[in-house]
Amino acid sequence: MRMPIVVLLALCSATLCAGAADHPLVELTTPQLNVVVYVPDAAKGFYRAQRFDWSGHTARIVHRGHTFTGPWKTPHDPLNQEAGMGPAEEFGLEDPAGYAEAAVGGSFAKIGVGVLGRADDGVYRFNKKHPVRALGVWTTTTGERWVESCQVQSPTDGWAWRYVKRIELDAAAPVMSIRHVLTNTGSKRIATSWYCHNFINIDGEKVGPSYRLATPEPVRPAAGEAAGSIAVLTETGPTGLRLREAMAGKALWGHLVGASNQPPAFAATIHNDRAGAAVAIAGDHPLLRSAVYALPAALCWEPFIAIALAPGEELTWTVRYTFSAERDR
C-alpha cells in the first residue's frame, strides 16, 4: 500500500517527532531494525544545501538496541553544505556534471539538488555556494517497510533528469537496501560520479581505537597520503585498518587502494569492537575508487562509482547495509 507522506508523518511517535526539530520524516520498523528517514522538502527538509542529495538522510538506525548513526555537526543547520547525516550521498564531489565545461555564469547539474550556475572560474569545491537556476521537485511515497523519494528536474539549459531513491527494510533480516534509479531526460550528457559519505557512529561512542574498517582485500592509503592525514590509521591484519588513537579534535581523509593499486571491491564493514556491533556495506556496481574519512563523531567508508548517461539512458544501482550485534544493548 502506498501512502502520501503527509499521512505518514502523523504516525511518528511524539518523542521522536519532537526531537527531529519538525523536519519531515518517516519511521520504518521491523523486528530487526528501526530506521528514521528524513524526507526531502524545500521548506522544512532536514537538508536543503547544495552538496548532498537531499534524500535518504537518517535520524536513527537501531538494531538490537545499538545505534549506527547520529548527529555529527551541531547545532544542525539545514543550509550548511556539510550537514548531512547517516548515508549522506553526493553526486560530483569534485566533478558535477557540466561544471568543467561551463563558463562563469553557465549552468551545471548537481543531481539530488538541482541546476546551479557556476559562480566563478575556480575549481569546484563542495563548500562553495552557487546561484540556483532551478531546484528539482521532490515527491515521497511509502509502504509498510519502505520509503521512496523521487526528484524530477525540469529541463533547464539542457539539463533534466528523473532520480528515484528507495530505502527498504528486509522483513526478516537486519538489512536496509537503498536502490537508486537515475534517468537522463535532458539533452545534455550526464557525466559525473556518485558516492556515499556513510556517517557511521556506533552507540554514540567517539571514534577511536575501538573502531576498525574491514575490507575484502588488503587496502592501504594511496601514494603520497600515508604520511598525511590518514597516518592515524594502522593495519589490523591483511584485510583491515584500525584507528590507533582517539580522533579528539582531529579529522582524517584519504583514498584507499588495494595491493594491485586498484580500488577494493564494493564492500567494507565498520566495526566497533567495544560495542560488539558492526555494519557491512556492499554495492552491486563496479567501484571507481574508495576513501576513508574520520572525525570524532563518525567513521566513514566512502565508495565511489562513475556515472555516464547519454540523453535517454538510465542507470540503476543498489547499496545494502547489513547490521549485526553480538548482544543486545
Image (cartoon, rainbow, N blue to C red):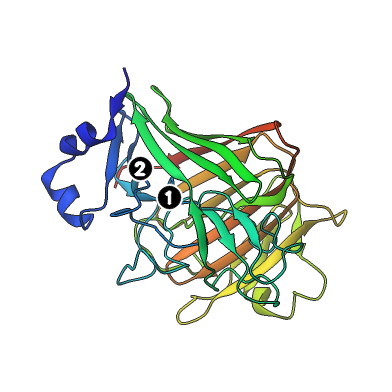
Whole-number angstrom distance, CA of label 2 to CA of label 1: 7 Å
Frontmost residue, 167 versus 199? 167
Where 241 falls versus 317 (above or below)? below
Q: Position of residue 82 (x, y in %)?
A: 47, 67
Residue at figure coordinates x 38%, y 36% from the top left: 139
> Is 321 or 159 nearer to us in this picture?
159
Query: Residue 156 shows which numbered tag?
Result: none
* Residue 68 percent location from the top left of the image: 40, 51
Which residue does the image show at 66% across and 70% down from the upper left?
124
Q: How many marks?
A: 2
Residue 166 horizontal side relative to residue 212, left or right: left
Give the farthest residue toward the left: 14
Q: Could one spot residue 297 in this view of the protein? A: yes
**Three-letter code, disc 2:** Arg
Q: Which residue is mark 2?
A: 327
Mark 2, secondary structure of its residue: loop
Label whose residue precedes the other's in the sequence (2 or 1) = 1
Q: Residue furthest right?
A: 260
**In the shown orientation, is residue 262 left or right of residue 75?**
right
- Check the image and report above or below for 293 versus 277: below
Residues marked 2 and 1 touching at CB (< 8 Å): yes
Image coords of residue 320 (percent x, y) = 54, 36
* Disc 1: which residue: 276
Mark 1, Cα crowd under 10 Å, few <14 / some 14-19 / many 20+, is some
**Res 325 seen here:** no
